[in-house]
Image: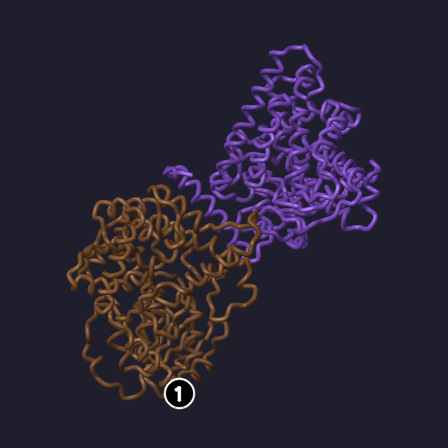
Chain colours: A brown, B purple
Amino acid sequence: MRVLLTSLAHNTHFYSLVPLAWALRAAGHEVRVASPPSLTDVITSTGLTAVPVGDDRPAVELLAEMGGDLVPYQKGFEFTEHEAPEETTWEYLLGQQTMMSALCFAPFNGAATMDAVVDFARDWRPDLVVWEPWTYAGPVAARACGAAHARILWGPDTIGRSRKRFLQAWEEQPPELREDPLAEWLGWTLERYGCAYDERDVLGHWVIDPGARSTRLDLGQTTVPMRYVPYNGRAVIEPWLAEPPARPRVCLTLGVSARETYGRDAVSYPQLLAALGRLDIEVIATLDASQRELVGELPGNVVPVDFVPLDALLPSCSVIIHHGGAGTWSTAMLHGVPQIVVPSLWDAPIKAQQLQRLSAGFNLPPAELTAEKLADAVRAAVDDPAIREGARRLREEMLADPAPAGIVPDLERLADAHRAVTRH
Amino acid sequence: MPTTATDDATRELGRRLQLSRAGQWFAGNQGDPYALILRAGTDHPAPYEDLVRAQGPWFRSDRLGTWVTADPATATAVLSDPRFGTLDRAGGRPDADLLPLSAAFPGHERAELARLRAAAGPVLGHTALAEGSCDASGAARRLLRRHLPAAGTGFDLVADLARPFAAGLVLRILGVPEGDREAAAGLLARCAPQLDGRFTPQTLAVARDSATAVEEVAGLVRELVAARRAKGRAGTHDDAVGRLLEDGVAPRDVERVALLLALGVPEPAATAVTGTVLRLLGRPGAWEAAERPPAAAEAVDRTLREEPAFRLESRVAHEDVELAGRRVPADGHVVVLAVAGRDLPGPDPLGGPDGPHFALALPLVRLAATTAVQAMAAALPGLSAAGPALTRPRSPVLRAYARCPVRA
């Protein structure tokens, strides 16, 4: 079959698609990746076939207006395990849909991109469109050409949960007060291509979920569980990576996404490094040249590295400290490494809380972070067998799910079923 | 309903409306009280208005780029200062790109408004109406009787009575032929969101529909004036258009006055009727007492003071202005919260010669509301609330009602 993958032009969003794309390709299916031209080189560097579509001007302009710092924009997106009562009100949930639609989804699926993806899909006629959760050009293109579409997650399905909560609150509202900005946006977008809005376009005909079972949010959707397989970009194994560490190794990374995109780190590196310098551990700190300059002199037990593939590094680590980015969180779970999360953006808080609840790590919110708390958490994560056991359980959960190659027959079956329904 | 393909302009309009809506939501989440007023959910804006007032003469909303005042002295000063106009120096509405309105929506500058009010005063001012101009009171009483339900029935005070009554009255005053009024009333109701859309983006469907409706009303008003002129001096001149033409007011100005009435009376009057009834029903004995005209008038005055017909007034500095300790630069956007007038004397505290943009409509709003409240109190002494009243979302200017279930 023909499978079209869609991603907004951002590495980490796209990386979540790569192993499945290759599984489909290796099974003999035709695969194309549609994204704005700024991602073309990244796509082709994975060996996949790129379809440059539209542009990312609306997103770039919006990010410029936001001043590059996304942290203030998190207010209203409190994605936590147990929502506070004020986070389940109609007003709050409507605000979330309002901001998600206009500030997240619409800018990353601008007019030119939508038109171009639809044009391509109508011409190429894919059987299946697989889309990462921000890239609504995917389901829109699928609808425009009659294909099935599946949403592939890269974390707990907070968008889905927010949507379900919103729809429930919507039902409870008197008709005069009901509004639905996301349906409004998708509605006029789909109408442009002769399609009527369908609620299934918001969350996908079905969902491909690479999360560990205990971290999934049960939203009652048709879900295809898939084992997470890391793709962190180009990887080269440096000789030092092959050597076993002499002391417990701790990885400290704020994640590729934060370094490359956001103007300011959520936490100060020198503060963290000083605390870790006093412990009997080895710290592998991912720092690029400009960060190294900012940090100044490093404690003796800190080894700076510019970039290291986490998939290669983590098996040798006792703990990882990170901000809760998608790839880092999943790769650490897959390798059974305890995680200390200083959550910053989007769904990071819920991931940090899950890890703490599952005894697989610690949640250290930036507002509460102190050097002592960090040192205490590292000591506990290194020494406490319960934490190691919690992390190992998550690894086992992940390994119990089929690898991307294993779900290809499921995707074939679901695409066939969709075709059968739409033909009759 | 068959779907029509969304064209480029519609898609872009929708994008802008949603973006400015999200911007207000975001600013509100950061604690900006002006943004919380504009967000206009179902809660009452009083706490946010109080927060603005607590800031002193000015609250600067950095995120929305606006100077806001709820201070009586500053509000009065802004409204009476000729350095503040309606449009910016290039002739555009502030934020027109984010909050698009119909091109026909009134955007008169101060001098023009003063001219229109002076021309309209002898026909549509407080005194003129009180002295029987256009037989407004009589017409209002007759109209209301037609909308009164039988005792014991449940009805929606807004949709079944206040709104059709107010629209019917303004159409009668304008001289729209009786047979055309029902269709025209529907048209007027569709215009109301444009008054709110100046500050708070409406949904795409409502923004487009209300803009179309305003264009149609502008067309209707033009035809009305043309027809009245063609008719000449024949017939009785108990309609405002005929009276104004007879007074020698330029036909173009008569059209402008008529449009201000058509947009500025119906929903504010319906809101004032509903708000007053709700207030009186909440106080033992008050509803029964309102059958006396002075009590009804006092109750409506009270309502309009607490809940102004037009809660937000927009102005633009035409030059750098130093006022109340702040320097508002040329083209700076200033918003006056009309509740600032609550503690000022007089029936229209901010409604003097330099009052709200729709000040010309206020006497008729007051007359309509007073007549309706008095006549209802007399005819329906057992009126009671039959469920919670709902405010229309995204209505920061009118705070219009979506419904108000009552029992006669």
The image position of residue B113, as x and y in percent, is 64, 28
Query: Can the viewer see residue B322 in this picture?
Result: no
The answer to whether residue A352 is left or right of residue B302 is left
Disc 1: host chain: A
- Position of the N terminus of chain A by quadrant: bottom left
Amino acid under label 1?
Answer: Ala
Q: Nearer the viewer, residue A24 or B96?
A: A24
Pointer 1 residue: A386
The answer to whether residue A50 is left or right of residue A260 is left
The image position of residue A258, as x and y in percent, is 36, 65
Q: Nearer the viewer, residue A116 or A321?
A: A116
**What residue lies at 67% left-to-right and 43% top-to-bottom?**
B155
The image position of residue B192, as x and y in percent, is 59, 37
**What residue lies at 48% left-to-right and 53% top-to-bottom?**
A98
**What residue lies at 35% left-to-right and 50% top-to-bottom?**
A109
Secondary structure category for the residue under label 1: helix
Q: Is residue B183 above or below residue B373?
A: above
Report which quarter residue A49 is drawn in: bottom left
Q: Is residue B378 above or below residue B215?
A: below
Report which quarter residue A385 is drawn in: bottom left
The image position of residue B54, as x and y in percent, is 68, 54
Query: Can the viewer see residue B226 in this picture?
Result: yes
